[in-house]
Image (spheres, rainbow, N blue to C red):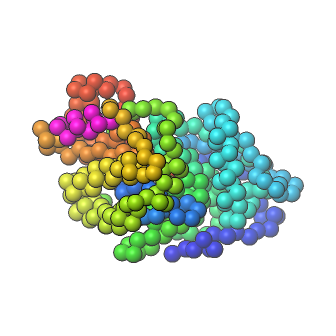
């Protein structure tokens, strides 16, 4: 296991290449057991476990030119879908400051980033997860050029570590198919500092679909950052943490034994508990919309009628993720389009092991 100190980096400026050009990409992820509440700088209160998606990605190209001497602050320009975005610029500034000790060479370059998502921005898909994971990959690709002797284990752990400092859930977007982030006493190699790959999916989980129904597009009324902060004083904080720790173990068991029913139960319990935390924090708030509840109720009816193992989860928003074996793609598509009349208002993605 690595400690944050292991990621501190020292170099001579002669070691740095004059220019660096590359493209980095990373997918979004969907948590089964959710990261909700922080302690310290981007450390989760509880362990989380997630699926890494396949198609919903951020793709970022970069051109970096070495400066004659390092600048006090990282010099960069960042275009998202060909446009400057002040909110992103502020987030990036904070991110570069946080990673400075671990990737100090970033100050020796002038960076130009161009980034885009393969999914609609603000569709409620975690674009900060894929965005920061892509950036972490880019930075670590440069580090690999400077230190080719680094082991693949170190490289992956540090990439996740760097991504985490941008956005907590980004720690889980650097690899797949299943990632675990946060120290768990019963799971070896887990760390608060970075996520690890978990690769014991039963064949029943070979290809898993995630159809994301877009209930609400645009910026959420209450950001995840605010939601995390409200967990500090939450009356159910301790109980929430202990339940999450148990559920991570139960999730691993279900995924390893191929038990869709057990898996689906945890998935839905977690989605509802996440939103219950929001409804019971001070101040309280709601991110589900009437449409969200309608879809959940229709899903429960549909599952009862058909016995298809299709379950839902939610992120910190109103959109509904339908998770089911990919062999049911056609049935679910039919149901969404003919019965729910959703037509094009959903994104179909998948998780592959
Ligand atoms: C509900 O990773 O977006 O999606 O660390 O502040 O960037 P920051 O938060 P973020 O929180 C994600 C919360 C969640 C659950 C999850 O993905 O585990």
Along the line of sight, the residue nearer the viewer: 80 or 216? 216
**Residue at 70% over, 69% down:** 9
Outermost residue to the left: 305
Residue 29, x across and y down, in percent: 43, 49
Q: Is residue 352 left or right of residue 73?
A: left
- Give the quarter of the image for residue 243: bottom left
Is 117 placed above or below 253 here? above
Is 249 placed above or below 165 here? below
First to last magenta residue range: 292-302
Is 217 placed above or below 3 here? above
Residue 189, x across and y down, in percent: 44, 73
**Residue at 61% over, 43% down:** 60
The C terminus appears in which quarter of the rendering?
bottom left
Q: Total of numbered circles in the picture?
A: 0
Residue 218, x across and y down, in percent: 50, 32
- Give the quarter of the image for residue 308: top left
Q: Is residue 296 a member of the stretch shown in magenta?
A: yes
- Would you say residue 202 is visible in this rendering? no
Report the magenta stretch's main SS.
helix
């Amino acid at each position: 296991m690595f400690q944050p100190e292991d990621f501190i980096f020292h170099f001579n400026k002669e070691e740095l290449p004059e220019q660096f050009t590359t493209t980095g990409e990373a997918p979004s992820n969907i948590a089964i057991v959710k990261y909700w509440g922080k302690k310290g700088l981007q450390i989760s209160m509880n362990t989380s476990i997630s699926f890494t998606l396949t198609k919903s990605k951020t793709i970022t190209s970069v051109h970096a030119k070495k400066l004659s001497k390092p600048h006090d602050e990282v010099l960069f320009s960042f275009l998202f879908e060909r446009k400057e975005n002040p909110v992103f610029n502020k987030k990036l500034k904070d991110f570069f400051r946080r990673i400075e000790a671990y990737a100090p060479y970033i100050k020796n370059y002038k960076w130009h980033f161009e980034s885009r998502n393969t999914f609609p921005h603000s569709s409620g898909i975690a674009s900060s997860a894929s965005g920061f994971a892509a950036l972490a990959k880019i930075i670590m690709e440069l580090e690999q050029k400077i230190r080719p002797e680094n082991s693949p284990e170190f490289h992956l752990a540090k990439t996740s570590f760097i991504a985490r400092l941008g956005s907590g859930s980004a720690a889980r977007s650097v690899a797949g198919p299943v990632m675990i982030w946060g120290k768990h006493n019963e799971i070896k190699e887990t760390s608060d500092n970075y996520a690890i790959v978990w690769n014991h999916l039963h064949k029943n989980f070979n290809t898993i679909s995630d159809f994301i129904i877009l209930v609400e597009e645009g910026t959420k009324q209450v950001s995840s950052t605010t939601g995390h902060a409200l967990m500090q004083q939450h009356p159910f904080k301790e109980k929430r943490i202990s339940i999450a720790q148990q559920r991570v173990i139960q999730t691993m068991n279900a995924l390893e034994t191929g038990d869709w029913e057990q898996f689906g139960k945890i998935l839905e319990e977690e989605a509802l508990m996440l939103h219950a935390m929001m409804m019971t924090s001070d101040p309280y708030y709601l991110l589900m919309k009437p449409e969200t509840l309608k879809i959940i109720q229709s899903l429960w009816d549909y599952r009862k009628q058909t016995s298809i193992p299709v379950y839902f989860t939610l992120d910190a928003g109103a959109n509904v993720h339908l998770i089911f074996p990919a062999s049911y793609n056609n049935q679910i598509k039919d149901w969404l389009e003919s019965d729910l009349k959703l037509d094009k208002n959903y994104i179909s993605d998948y998780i592959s092991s």
